[in-house]
Amino acid sequence: MKTREKNKAEKLDDSNRLLQAEKAFQSSAIEFTNEFIDSEGNVLYATWQSAVDKKWEIERIKEIAAMAKVGDEWDYSNGITGAYRYRNA
């Protein structure tokens, strides 16, 4: 499999995706906190799960951003991101 280093546009795409995920998590965390306060600790499961999902998304994007190479196929164990992730970047 051919691999190459990530270019500037791909690195910028990673940064933009991380920023969007962080903003989504912040909104979810605010919603969770407000619901927690308003309901005296009885938070809806869906609100909690939304915050957890958004936190997981941030961690996944950070892992992908840390991968230095791009290839035809994903190879997490060798730090290679699939090229199709950046087709619209």
Image: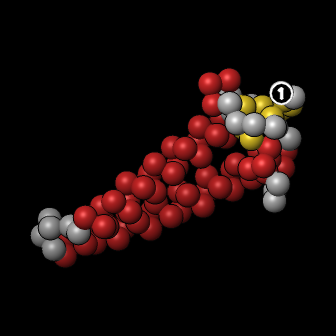
User: In the displayed structure, does residue 26 sit left or right of residue 46?
Assistant: right
Q: Tell me, yes or no, if residue 50 can be seen here.
A: yes
Above/below status of 69 relative to 89: above
Left or right: where 51 falls relative to 60: left
Judge by depth and name the residue closer to the eye, 37 or 56.
56
- Front in this rendered view, residue 63 or 12: 63
Q: Residue at x 51, y 51 (%)?
A: 57
Residue 53: x %, y % from top left: 42, 55
Q: Specify the amino acid type for callout 1.
A: Met
List x then y, in percent, for residue 4: 86, 31
Q: In which quadrant will I find the C terminus?
A: bottom right
Question: What residue do we see at 70% from left, 48% from top?
Answer: 14
Residue located at (82% from left, 54% from top) = 87
Residue 72: percent from the left, percent from the top?
81, 37
- Residue 64's x, y, as percent? 64, 40
Specify the quadrant of the image occupied by residue 1. Answer: top right
- The residue furthest bottom is 38
Residue drawn where x is 69% and y is 50% of the image: 15
Circle 1 sits on which residue? 1
**Which class describes the residues within 10 Å of circle 1: few (<14), some (14-19), or many (20+)?**
few
Whether residue 12 is visible: no
Secondary structure at numbered mark 1: loop
